[in-house]
Image: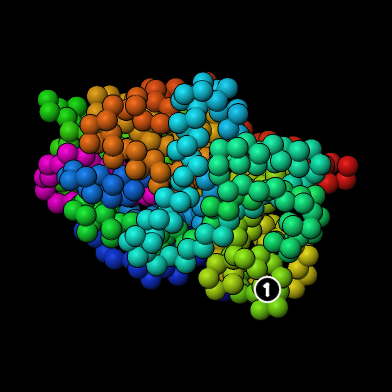
Amino acid sequence: MTAAIGQEARGASLWHAVSGNRRERPALQGGLDVDLAIVGGGFAGLSTALHAAEKGISVAVLEAEIIAWGATGRNAGFVVPNFAKMDPDSIVAHLGPERGERLIDFAAGSADLVFGLIKRHGIDCDAVQNGWIQPAHSPAALEKVKSRAGQWAWRDRPAVTLDRQDVEALTGARGYVGGWMDRSGGVLNPVAYANGLAGAAQKAGAKIFERTPVTSVDRVVDGWSLKTPSGSARAGKVLIATNAYGGSLNPLLQRSYFPLKIFQIATEPLPRDVRTRLLPGGQGVGDTRRNLFTFRFDADNRLISGGMHILSAGADTRVPHTIWRRLASHLDLPDLPPLAYGWSGMAAVEPDFLPHLLDLGPGLIAGRACNGRGIAMTTAMGKVLADWAAGTEVRDLPLPFAPPAPIPFHALLRHAPNMLLGWSMLRDRLDDTA
């Protein structure tokens, strides 16, 4: 093992370690007046800043730590242009035809938007847009993914169904009964991508401040006043883009989602002969298990996978090794190279697993679009939020908009995803033996 496991407090993800386009940015000192203030320097905040600045809007990003410190720098780097739990037909039934189809269109183009920004701004982030694959672990799951692929294909998306042989040829993984692929998905280095977005936003005129935690957001006559330890900002509009890293800034927001701690690992680089068998096209994989199994390679042939924990005690040490063993087993790799990196991060999961804009007051909103699809969805959310900053009514945007709704018994239910993991694992094992 060449790196310590579970160093979240020091930001020790693989991506932080290997990204070479990091630049220092100052903390806010003194006063600042802008049209739009953004709290949080992740994908959502940076995409909003870039698109707003390109519209001629004066914008400042206030990041409590460094760019890509939160979930943005702690994920696996999958770019997935669909929803984690709901398929298009279900979304139409949930939101109605007009709003449902607008949200579906928003998601459908999200990966193309990401890779288009990378190309347009020359962002060096090891981006590969060769597709995202979802193998089915059981016959019942296969029927669901066939329907899912059909619903996206009907909307002219590059979605294709895969049989058993297709999945094995594309992934190198055995045991799946079929699956589907969205050809517009892909993978990238998320920290390098975020740093590239930040640089592009600054070139467009946005101001970005690091190590500038916002301690309060207060209503004033002409907008909002944001206080920081060494300065303040006044803005006509404010976006809270902290996802699950908002701390105590707005306790109501904290009670309106499920915080989910996700662990990721990266192995030492794999030998070339093994690498050519697994994912020869460089796609990302996330299967249909309830205890989701994911894998991909980075640019240096490290194998990356993730997982959750049931018990938090000792999880930072225990869970990465559990993920490593699962990876070796599912991919039939008895000689899997040892762990090189292990890290974790917090994701915000909405009760309906859909992106949302939250009404916190006149000209003050929060945006959350992660739910396991953070890179694509939050980048796309930033583009539409720039329209809001330019004067579009928020209710005319394609995302659901409402005041935050605290989850009843949140103090207990916030642990539900982890508490139910054991049951999910048991059901997956029953599926595998059926």
Splitting the image into 4 quarters, where does residue 52 fall? top left
Q: Where is residue 260 in the image (x, y as percent from the top left)?
A: 54, 41
Seen at 65% across and 68% down, the residue is: 280
**Disc 1 residue type (three-letter):** Thr
| Quarter of the figure with the N terminus | bottom right
The answer to if 32 sits in the magenta stretch is yes
Count the labels in the image. 1
Left or right of residue 151: residue 71: left
Q: What element carries label 1?
A: helix
Q: Where is residue 14 in the image (x, y as percent from the top left)?
A: 50, 65
Seen at 53% across and 70% down, the residue is: 299
Which residue carries the number 1 mark?
A: 276
Left or right of residue 339: residue 219: left
Seen at 66% across and 48% down, the residue is: 160
- The image's colour scheme reads rainbow
Note whether residue 161 is visible: yes
Q: Where is residue 162 in the image (x, y as percent from the top left)?
A: 72, 51
Splitting the image into 4 quarters, where does residue 403 fall? top left
Write down the region rendered in magenta.
28-43
Left or right of residue 138: residue 421: left
Seen at 46% across and 25% down, the residue is: 99
Query: How would you classify the magenta stretch by its main secondary structure?
Result: strand
